[in-house]
Image (spheres, grey):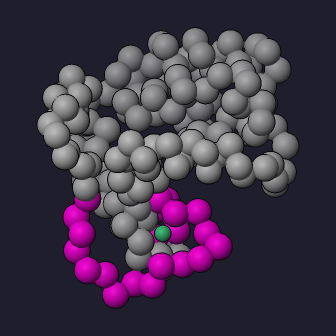
Amino acid sequence: RIGRMPSERAALLEAIEGWQWEIDLRRSDRPILTGVVHGLRATYVKGCGCEPCIAANRAYNFERVHGQETDLVDAGKARARLQILRGRGVTQAAIVRATRIRKETLRKIEHGEARRILPRTETAILALTYEIVRKFELPDQYVDAAPTWKLLDDMIARGWPKAWIAH
Ligand SMILES: [Zn+2]
């Protein structure tokens, strides 16, 4: 039920002491690739067998099979956010890089052709702020990793499983 569980229910589960959002720990013969971005179906397709990549592939397959059963949400809030960002000069390419949402999907949402969208698509778009997305204007630009490590260490110290952070 990745991305499908009502947040109140997720919060109730998270309130249980020791609760972990673990995924299927099935053994895999696939190697864990290095030098790639994990937690993506594309990386799974390249052959990665790490938990986040397997989870991403499973979520993709579930979506493909159960796509029509998914509860879609109104695209209005996401559209408004996209229009504000675009109005401030943010390029579509930067939004694609920041969200990993397909260009065509973003175009349809922005222009009102897509009226209902997947909850996770809405979440990804609403997570964007001008400050965040403008960092994606220039591709292949490396920044200091220290602040990211600090956040990761903090989440791990609070008990967030790495697989969940990656997802
Ligand atoms: Zn991987």
| Camera-side residue of 148 and 1 | 148
Residue at left offset 72%, top offset 21%: 130
Residue at left offset 36%, top offset 53%: 161
Residue at left offset 69%, top offset 30%: 132
9 in the magenta segment: no
Image x and y of residue 102, in percent: 58, 43
Image x and y of residue 64, in percent: 32, 53
Q: Can residue 54 be seen in this view?
A: yes
Image x and y of residue 74, in percent: 38, 17
Q: In this view, does 61 lie to the left or right of 143?
A: left
Compared to residue 67, the image places residue 14 above or below, namely: above
Q: In this view, does 79 lie to the left or right of 117?
A: right
Q: Quadrant of the N terminus?
A: top left
Q: Is residue 127 left or right of residue 26?
A: right
Compared to residue 160, the image places residue 38 above or below, namely: below
- Looking at the rendering, the stretch of residues picked out in magenta corresponds to 23-44
Image x and y of residue 71, in percent: 25, 29
Q: Can residue 111 be seen in this view?
A: no
Q: In which quarter of the image is residue 80?
A: top right
Extreme residue toward the front, this view:
157
Q: Quadrant of residue 27?
A: bottom left
Compared to residue 129, the image places residue 149 above or below, namely: below
Q: Is residue 88 left or right of residue 63?
A: right
Residue at left offset 34%, top offset 87%: 29
